[in-house]
Amino acid sequence: MTETLVLLDNTVLSNFSVVQQPGLAIAACPGRACTTEAAFAEYLAAPGEERFAEHAWRDLSIIELTEGERQLAEALTERLGVEFWTADRRLWQAVGATLPWVRLLDA
């Protein structure tokens, strides 16, 4: 049986930074904690002293979503009626004009 990845979003990264314990998130699920390139870019773009430097998350795997995973995320976002923020300029340029709920995180 394959172990399930634990995907940490910007909120999780930020919350562990606020309490100055980014290592706890990784230690809680060793070998399974990861984030996406877009979520990590969003985290790094956030202002504030609470945010840890990039190296604080050096043990966190950063994954790239497949096209199928991106499509699933887009479909869920549309169905749930929430905004989809991305740092992926190519994605935003491809769909931004027709899908107004897709927003570009431009740091």
Image (cartoon, rainbow, N blue to C red):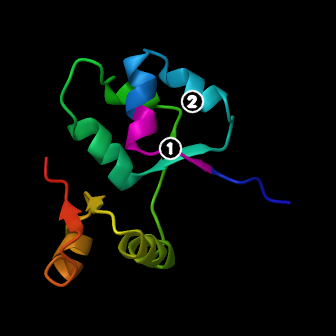
Task: Give the residue at x 46% y 31%.
Answer: 58
Quarter-of-image position of residue 56: top left
Pointers 2 and 1 in contact (C-beta within 8 Å): yes
Report how far apart the C-alphas of labels 2 and 1 lie in the structure. 8 Å
Q: Which mark is drawn over residue 87?
A: none
- Under mark 1, the amino acid is Leu
Q: Residue at the right extreme?
A: 1
- Indicate whether residue 8 is drawn in magenta: yes
For residue 99: magenta?
no
Residue drawn at (40%, 39%), measured in percent from left and top? Answer: 11
Picture disc at residue 25: 2
The quadrant in which the N terminus is found is: bottom right
- The one of 80 and 49 positioned closer to us in this rendering: 80
Labelled disc at residue 8: 1
Residue 68 x %, y % = 50, 79
Q: Quarter-wise, where is residue 9 in the image? A: top left
Residue plotted at (20% across, 63% down): 103
The span picked out in magenta is 6-13
* Residue 45, quarter of picture: top left
- Nearer the N terminus, badge 2 or badge 1? 1
As drawn, 22 above or below 98? above
